[in-house]
Image (cartoon, grey):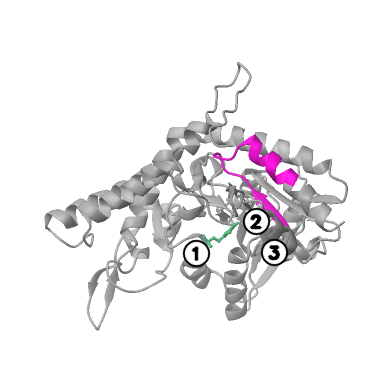
Amino acid sequence: MNGATVRRSAARPVFDVGRIRADFPILDIKVAGKPLVYLDNAASSQMPQPVIDRLVRYQREEHANIHRGVHYLSETATAAFESARGKIARFIKAREEREVIFTSGTTESINLVMHGFGRKFIGAGDEIILTTLEHHSNIVPWQMLAEEKGAKIRVVPIDDSGALLVDDYEKLFNERTKFVGLSHVSNALGTVNPVKAMIAFAHARGVPVLLDGAQAAPHLAIDVQDLDCDFYAFSGHKLCGPTGIGILYGKAAQLERMQPFKGGGDMILSVSFEKTTYNVIPYKFEAGTPPIAAAIGLGAAVDYLSGVGMAAIAAHELELLGRATEQVNRLPGVRILGTAEHKAAVLSFIVEGVHPHDIGTLLNQDGIAVRTGHHCAQPVMQRFKVPATSRASFAFYNTLAEVDALVAGIRNVQKVFA
Ligand SMILES: Cc1ncc(COP(=O)(O)O)c(C=O)c1O
């Protein structure tokens, strides 16, 4: 499987997956004596050597606390940290670097918006629109806010393919609608939502929109200005970067009118017991010492992804998803959940008569890593009346041969349970 090269038609450039795989040392490990087939990328993706090297170089040669020292190491670390912010701003096409806030991940980014925007601007009787497809991270913070303020959550339903019912979304708006939280790509089903049109509809009614981009940023070229979202949240560890780092993009005008989320060092201009003045954005939202190494590592990760090219990544992953969908569809007794027209990199499935956890355990014996469970998207499971699914999720370093290994693995599971 390693070293496989995907050849494409003359119209498209060759995507050399073998060369890419050589950058990911972990892909060479064996599991249960078999080559690892890592198909749990929606949970966390793997890290290429250039990102590992960048982290090591930082720790060996550049580490100190940032933003407060005049000495060499502090200035070096500060420059590297702020340079990472710039790389990420360019990666998502933010208008300004100060619109990029370092957080610990998507979950914290959404909580930041809930505290900074929600607690200030959403009150009793106001309504927040979410969708059935949301990850718990984009449900629970809003429920906490609704409970605290006496606000109400309205939910956009999905059809049997896992696509949002956009007409129903539009009907949910009224004069009490104050906020929309929307996944760009569903982690449980892979549905790519028509977010640009949904944002335009909300904006025409003066309602700001947060996109949960945790499953979109690793697979699609993101242009926050073109999407015109007010907020965009994603995680480093799903983007070939380190854990413990994430991004909240926010339009400067929105971030400026928000209240701080956490109080502490670095987020202030001056402190006295009479009055504290907050720092300018993005620092107003970055209290305390940030995960400096992880931020720099994420900068290296987006450099790496840009080097491969997000368009090439998306095309290769669609090829993997297409092959997997076609082959799994041919297996009697296997049902794919999530058959929307627009999908990215996720194949959720149910094998008749076999619990997903047993599927995961048996696949693991073949060296194949998939995720089983509710994927922190229990409303999706409730909609399809299943407790759990098995989920294979692809990254650009996966191969067509690995898709075939997955299909053979599922057949084997069926034999064991026949
Ligand atoms: C769509 C979506 N949102 C939010 C999250 C939470 O991300 P994190 O755990 O990195 O904060 C995930 C993680 O799986 C996700 O898939």
Viewer-nearest of discs 1 and 2: 2
Q: Give the label on residue 113, or none.
A: 1
- Position in image of residue 366 (x %, y %): 66, 51
Going from N to C along the chain, the mark reached first, 1 or 2, is 1
Q: Is residue 397 magenta?
A: yes
**In front: 250, or 309?**
309
Residue 272: % across, % down: 22, 79
Residue 364: which numbered mark, if any?
2
Q: Is residue 21 left or right of residue 187?
A: left
Determine crowd level at label 2: few under 14, some 14-19, many 20+ residues with C-alpha closer than 10 A. Answer: some
Give, as a three-letter code, the residue at label 1: Val
Which residue carries the number 3 mark?
Answer: 373
Amino acid of disc 2: Asn
Q: Residue 152 or 113: which is nearer the viewer?
A: 113
Q: Amino acid at mark 3?
A: Gly
Residue at 37% over, 49% down: 52
The image's mark for residue 298 is: none
The part of the chain drawn in magenta is: 390-408
Give the residue displayed 48% in from the left and 32% down from the top. Answer: 19
Q: Residue lying farthest bottom? A: 273
Label 1: which secondary element = helix
Of marks 3 and 1, which one's residue comes earlier in the chain?
Answer: 1
Look at the image and tell me in which quarter the N terminus lies.
Answer: top right
Is disc 2 placed on a helix, strand or loop?
A: helix
CA separation, marks 3 and 2? 15 Å
Answer yes or no: do the residues labelled 3 and 2 have beta carbons within 8 Å? no
